[in-house]
Amino acid sequence: NAGVTQTPKFQVLKTGQSMTLQCAQDMNHEYMSWYRQDPGMGLRLIHYSVGAGITDQGEVPNGYNVSRSTTEDFPLRLLSAAPSQTSVYFCASRSGATNEQFFGPGTRLTVL
Amino acid sequence: AQRVTQPEKLLSVFKGAPVELKCNYSYSGSPELFWYVQYSRQRLQLLLRHISRESIKGFTADLNKGETSFHLKKPFAQEEDSAMYYCALFNSARQLTFGSGTQLTVLP
């Protein structure tokens, strides 16, 4: 099993550009989520999904969109990038049996 | 609303010394707490959870409901324990709320 995979690993954007961060898991987990990690602020939940076709907002959803067309994939879209979105983004999926959350390797995004 | 507080951003100890990473929480229900660890250049991974009452890599954590704490302890720190540690609370909405993290450095 690959677990949770994310692409790209690094990305530099200009203000106003859009892009999609990809996330996939092969563990058949229903629950998936996106976090951003900023120094001194820990991990903050952006959006989450409890199953295919169902998404909801987390703590810091503004400026981000998600969709969940399949159990495996949970892409995060930045509609119009802003410097405040410079961060490290982690995707995660969670086992319904154990509540253990598995994280991807992260995407380091810089918005100029 | 739930909150997880890790008061120490940075913590340094010498190899072989005891280490305690503090975590306090506020939550009106029955909490389910976790410690996650992120080693340099690696992804976050689960270290331990309170319901398992297990010891992983020599670390233990006891839930103290009276003090609303879930401190992480290890009697003899090793250099390979240097990492970022996050305390997390599982709330009734089935979401994980993370603390701000403590960067532990174990000095030789």
Image (tube, rainbow, N blue to C red):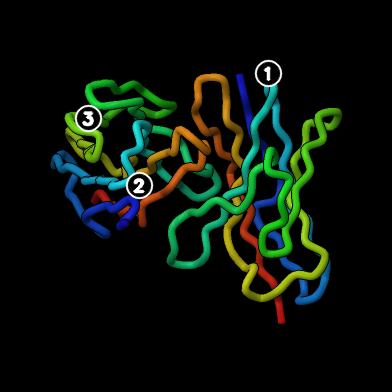
Amino acid on which disc 1 is placed: Gly
Q: Which residue is drawn at 79% across and 43% down?
A: B62
Residue at the extreme bottom of the image, as rendered: B108
Q: Is mark 2 on a helix, strand or loop?
A: strand
The span from disc 1 to disc 2 (Cα, nearest Å) is 29 Å
Instruction: State yes or no: discs 2 and 3 in contact (Cβ < 8 Å).
Output: no
Residue matched to label 2? A89
Q: Are marks 1 and 2 on the same chain?
A: no
Q: Residue at x 18, y 35 (%)?
A: A80
Q: Which chain carries label 1?
A: B
Tell me the quadrant of the picture where the N terminus of chain A can be found: bottom left
Q: What element carries label 1?
A: loop
Residue matched to label 1? B29
Q: Are marks 2 and 3 on the same chain?
A: yes
Q: Quadrant of residue A106?
A: bottom left
Residue at the extreme right of the image, as rendered: B66
Residue matched to label 3? A68
Q: Residue at x 80, y 70 (%)?
A: B76
Q: Where is residue B56 in the image (x, y as percent from the top left)?
A: 67, 58
Can you say whether A70 is above or below B39 in the image? Answer: above
Q: Mark 2 lies on which chain?
A: A
Q: Nearer the viewer, residue B5 or A98?
A: A98
Q: Classify residue B22 as left or right of residue B41.
A: right
Q: Nearer the viewer, residue A106 or A112?
A: A106
Q: Where is residue B9 in the image (x, y as percent from the top left)?
A: 65, 52
Q: Which of B105 and A6 is in front in this view?
A: A6
